[in-house]
Amino acid sequence: MTNTNTSDMTNTEFVQHIMEFSKHGALSQMVVVDCLQRGLEHYISHKDEILEAEKARREKGQYSLIDMEAWVSCCEDNLERIQQKYNPQNVYNGRNSI
């Protein structure tokens, strides 16, 4: 990657830049993966509240740009992928065991 102007980077390029070009070396990769996992776990642990709030907004005629059911499903899928790679003993029947 030759682009060092982060404002011009795609999201993929930016995450790659964070993980590969850090004064902290490989520790930066561990931080990124840990933060990603913790963020996904947070959304999933608040799944019911997120979906209830989305339902309430829809009932009021308010629609979000992002379908929160799809958002939560994406979180579950990505967390499962992380668990399969880094912690496969916590994966049960295609879903992690949070």
Image (tube, rainbow, N blue to C red):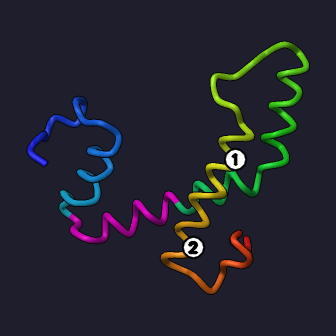
The residue at the point 77 percent across, 51 percent down is: 46
Label whose residue precedes the other's in the sequence (2 or 1) = 1
Q: Is residue 30 magenta?
A: yes
Outermost residue toward the front in this view? 93
Residue drawn at x 62%, y 52% is 75
Q: Which residue is mark 2?
A: 83
Q: Position of residue 61 (x, y in %)?
A: 84, 13
Dot 2 alpha-carbon crowd within 10 angstroms: few under 14, some 14 to 19, many 20 or more: some
Element at badge 1?
helix
Above or below: residue 43 compared with residue 58: below
Q: Amino acid at mark 2?
A: Gln
Q: Which mark is residue 72?
A: 1
Magenta-drawn segment: 24-36
Quarter of the view holding residue 60:
top right
| Residue 20 pos. (x, y %) | 22, 60
Q: Quadrant of residue 10?
A: top left
Q: Residue type at mark 1?
A: Val
x then y, percent, for residue 90: 66, 81
- Image quadrant for the C terminus? bottom right
In the depicted structure, whether residue 89 falls above or below residue 30: below
| Secondary structure predominantly adopted by residues drawn in magenta | helix
Up-down: is 63 above or below 19?
above
Q: Position of residue 52 (x, y in %)?
A: 87, 37
Q: Is residue 59 above or below residue 34?
A: above
